[in-house]
Amino acid sequence: MGTRITVIEQLGVETAEGVFDAIAAGPADGRPVLFLHGFPEAAVQWEHQVAVLGGQGYRAVAFDQRGYSPGVRPDHHREYGMDSLVGDVLAVADALGWSCFDLVGHDWGAAVAWCAAHEHPGRLRTLTAVSTPHPRAFADAVESDEDQHLRSRYMTEWRSTSTEQRMLADDAAALRRMFEWQVPPSKVDEYVRRLSEPGALTAALNWYRAGRPGKGIGRVTVPTLYVWSTEDVAFGSTAAFGTAEWVSGPYRFEMLEDVSHWVPEQVPEVLTALIAEHLGT
């Protein structure tokens, strides 16, 4: 596919759960690619990838997930479990008229993508997971590897009801520090603005309060690209290298040296090229 200039569109995707906000690019009849963002971000973290793939003729869509879209922001943390999150992916795809699509996720979005690939392989053409390892490899690493256990303590700490106040204090200083000065300041400002809206940060943290997938996820059969960066503060090498054991379909592992957790925005061109190559094969 050649690349041409494309315009990013703003969409409202109507589902039974409510309206999900989204960005999109590319021809309506292009091969569909769906992007899932992580915490504490939004669909706009994928602006570069959506624009480039849209220009290559794909129909690229990234949506603000449950809790991040004001139109789908349930009150109780139990409504943020993995079944609901995976259900949202399928509901958005159905609303877009996609019976089969490529799925790309980063951070929490990658955790959802792994589960969607395991539970609904017939709906996915390919999977690309960025940063987050296969949930089973991650769970095993937390139990067996002291380094990963220490890296993951924040997941328990963030379930506290005082987390919102700590993260938003002093112009959201703690929230801003998470990005390690690797994300453009304008994007950080946008994420802080969104999560400072009433109820927004609580909804995002409810993903942690609802728990994480782990032992129940089996091997993934769809063609998979897993991208991990050596300076990722959340996920260490044990889980990253262990992910290969949990993919039985065609598998490609890419390790990015000297790159932080924020891969899509720190090295957008590198990641977009990897995704495009994976889709092409």
Image: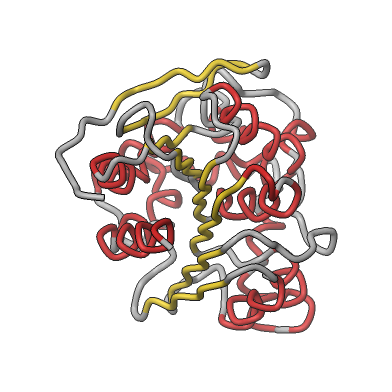
Q: Which residue is drawn at the image coordinates 25% and 60% (left, top)?
A: 269
Give the residue drawn at x 29%, y 65%.
270
- Residue 171 as seen in the image, left or right of residue 87: left
Give the image quarter of residue 24: top left
Q: Position of residue 236 (x, y in %)?
A: 57, 78
The reply, left or right, for residue 136 in relation to residue 30 is: right
Q: The C terminus lies in which quarter of the figure?
A: bottom left
Q: Position of residue 63 (x, y in %)?
A: 47, 33
In this view, the residue in front, 109 or 205, is 109
- The location of residue 240, given as percent across then percent down, is 58, 76
**Residue 260 appears left or right of 228:** left
User: Quarter of the image holding residue 264?
Assistant: bottom left
Quadrant hosting residue 280:
bottom left
Quick check: 268 above or below 34?
Answer: below
Indicate whether 142 appears above or below 269: below
Q: Residue at x 67, y 58 (%)?
A: 155
Residue lying farthest to the right in this orientation: 216
Farthest residue, direction left: 5
Q: Is residue 196 above or below residue 188?
A: above
Q: What colour-coding does the image apply?
A: secondary structure
Position in image of residue 52 (x %, y %): 25, 46
